[in-house]
Amino acid sequence: MLLMIKMMKPFYTLQEGNDLKLVFAYQYFSVVKGNEVYQFIPVESNEIRINLKTKQIDNLTDVFVFQRGTRIFRIPLFQLLQISDLVDHLKSITTFYVQQVKSDIEEEQYNEEIYHLEKQNIHRLIDKALQDGDRELFMKLTDRLLTEEAAL
């Protein structure tokens, strides 16, 4: 049984740190099974939770239910991923959020690197103050170094 996603628009999305929750409601998610369109109904699960850092889905065992008239079929999320084009739809929805998390991680790494370079520079200036016998500069730099380390 192959399924095609006809429409997939989250009713709303919620990002909490690296976690993204896509919540679905009636008429926002439908699949084509055979030649028939089945509408999502939020009877069991109604969300897909994605870790944006690892790009992994956290709730693979949740069951999604689709209906056409009186016919209903239930399918676990992991199986829906295997037999449909769901991954492509999820990529298009989550691209912005993944890039945002990636930018945040890169900025954090950049800031860390700057901090380490500044710390190395202070150590070099302390060494120079010791060589030059500049007690005042030495005290000022060591105080600054101790203050910054205490702040962490």
Image: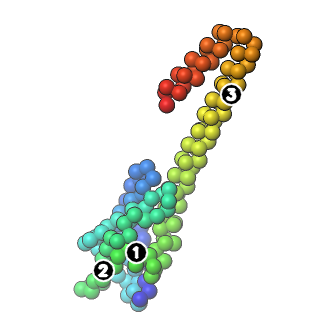
Viewer-side residue, 140 vs 89: 140
The mark nearer the N terminus, 1 or 3, is 1
- The image quadrant that residue 73 belongs to is bottom left
Observer able to see residue 79: yes
Q: Residue at x 52, y 52 (%)?
A: 101
Residue wearing tag 1: 78
Viewer-side residue, 85 vs 119: 119
Residue 72 position, x and y percent, is 27, 83
Q: Which residue is drawn at 49% across and 31% down?
A: 152
Q: What residue type is labelled 3?
A: Asn
Observer able to see residue 40: no
Q: Is residue 134 above or below residue 148?
A: above
Q: Which amino acid does label 2 sit on?
A: Arg
- The image quadrant that residue 9 belongs to is bottom left
Residue wearing tag 2: 74
Residue wearing tag 3: 121
Q: Residue at x 61, y 42 (%)?
A: 110
Question: SS class of the residue under badge 2?
Answer: strand
Instruction: Count all numbered tags in the image, as a single digit.
Output: 3
Question: SS class of the residue under badge 1?
Answer: helix
Question: From the viewer's perspective, is the residue at label 2 or at label 3 nearer?
Answer: 3
| Mark 2, other Cα within 10 Å: few <14 / some 14–19 / many ≥20 | some
Viewer-side residue, 91 vs 52: 52
**Residues marked 2 and 1 touching at CB (< 8 Å):** no
